Image (tube, grey):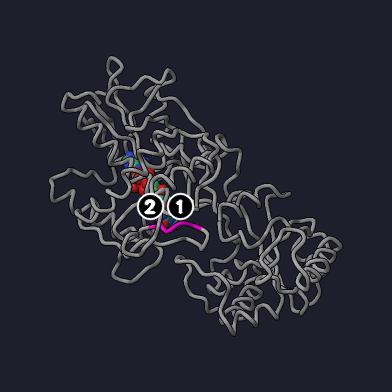
Amino acid sequence: MGMGPLGIGTRYQRQQMIDITVEKAFNMFMEYTHYNVDARLVKQYFSLSGDTIEWLEDLGVEFEGAFRYFPRSEATWHIVKTDQGIGPRAASFMVKALYEKAQELGVTILLQTTAKKIIMENGKVAGVSAVDKDGNEIIIKCNAAIICNGGGGSNKKLIKDETGLDHGENLFSFAIPGLEGDGLRMAWEAGADKLPVRIEMAASLEGMDELPPGVSMVFNQPNLLVNKFGKRIMNEDQMQNATFLSNAAAHQKDKVVFSIVDSSIVKYYIRNGVDHVSLVRNNPDVTDFNDGIKTAKENENKYIFSADSIAELAGKAGIDPAGLEETVDQYNDFCDTRDEEFFKDQRYMRPIAKAPYYCARIRPGGYGTVGGIRINENCEVLNRDFDKIEGLYAAGADACNIYDDSYMFLLPGNSMGFAVNTGRLAAMSAVEYAEGGEK
Ligand SMILES: Cc1cc2nc3c(=O)[nH]c(=O)nc-3n(C[C@H](O)[C@H](O)[C@H](O)COP(=O)(O)OP(=O)(O)OC[C@H]3O[C@@H](n4cnc5c(N)ncnc54)[C@H](O)[C@@H]3O)c2cc1C
């Protein structure tokens, strides 16, 4: 469903005069994670990532170039070229190219077939047991296996057990069908050391599904964000980093925050376009906002509110009215002077002063789970003693233990980048092992 992987030191970056090096990215990353991750794995991944972009091109994948996710991020996101321009699901064209190449090479692909167990003999991989769509067991004999089952983003119980979060109640993440955590379970059963499974957090606006895009676009702009007490929670200028916003939301009472605008701000956006766009949502035009609010009212949308006074808006949304009135008063003063509370850029300080007022709920969200299987920098799976489990490799979200507690959006394309690069590394190690070499 994504748009493209990270690459560092690629020809696109050179052509676009973008100055990002493995050294800079590595140092940024290690400081961001407080060195609470495997530096050898991070270095190996970043070092290979430029070459991987060219490798993908050799396999028939085309790229639009190297992009930022938001202005403060680095241009590491290599968006895959499609037949419809830049947009969500672009990376499906990469998957298609890889699939076609695999078929050309004679790879056997078993669709609708679920891997169930890694068969171990004398502490080494001896095969994989799977079940096809009719329930027939298939045994694949092999001495090397790579686990890359994408984590457990749709497994509510796994998410609750591992993170304490309740999907659908206080976590609103993508739940990609089929991502049940099978790879994690199979690896742990085979003796892999268990590392924390985390959610790759990115905030989510509630109740937007049936509404035109202008509604979510307006509520994603850096205006006023408050919690249930009506108090501000952050410098809203930082909310473009969806991981930061998700983390901030997760720290509030009932894990909810509210984005508030007034009708002057809406009118300004309708006239001029919004302040911030992204490549995922790249249309600054929000002329459909008022129609969207109408639809929300007709559909009795429980997450979007409008009112003629701040107190009424607070009452409808479940925010403390006195707290919100006090915050709005103070915020409007800051608009005339400077944001003494969180130092937001004055460009985005617009008063909340003209009725009707609008409010939407933002909750912690995420792309899926990351991490759980301990690997080394060659993607060999390790047991609790840090010994290699012979013949077992892991890649992608199942083995993505490199973010510590927060997704690193400042280097966008990081999770698909980790997946394709560790996929390559795991394959290189597995081939060497299968052919009788060291790894
Ligand atoms: C909406 C969205 C947008 C995203 N955008 C980006 C982006 O632009 N850039 C970026 O870097 N990342 C992005 N991501 C994250 C990125 O897509 C993932 O990190 C990446 O796909 C992980 O790759 P993977 O190979 O580990 O797992 P997946 O791509 O999830 O593949 C795992 C596969 O294993 C299959 N599987 C599961 N269990 C079994 C089993 N028991 N037997 C057989 N097969 C099984 C699954 O069906 C699936 O096909 C996005 C994610 C989402 C949801």
Q: Which residues are magenta?
A: 73-77
* Image point (45%, 33%), residue name: 38
Instruction: Pick whichever of labels 2 and 1 is earlier in the sequence.
Output: 2
Amino acid type at mark 1: Leu
Q: Position of residue 359 (x, y in %)?
A: 69, 68
> Of the numbered discs in the image, which one, if any, rests on residue 6?
2
Q: Is residue 9 magenta?
A: no
Q: Residues within 10 Å of mark 2 (few under 14, many from 20)?
A: many
Q: Is mark 1 within 8 Å of ligand 1?
A: no
Mark 1: which secondary structure?
A: loop
Q: Is residue 2 left or right of residue 258?
A: left
Up-down relation of residue 70 to residue 134 (above or below): below
**Count the marks: how many?**
2
Q: Disc 1 marks which residue? A: 411
Q: Main secondary structure of the magenta part?
A: loop
Q: Is residue 241 left or right of residue 298?
A: left
Q: Quadrant of residue 385?
A: top left
Residue 436 falls in which quadrant of the image? top left
Residue 112 image offset from top left, x and y in percent: 29, 46
Q: Position of residue 364 (x, y in %)?
A: 60, 52
Q: Residue at horizontal 34%, vertical 39%? A: 148
Q: Do callouts 2 and 1 mark residues in contact (Cβ within 8 Å)? A: yes
Is residue 267 or residue 308 the one in the foreground?
267
- Residue 75 magenta: yes
Give residue 270's position: percent from left, percent from top. 59, 82
Residue type, mark 2 in image: Leu
* Residue beneath the point at 68% across and 54% down: 256
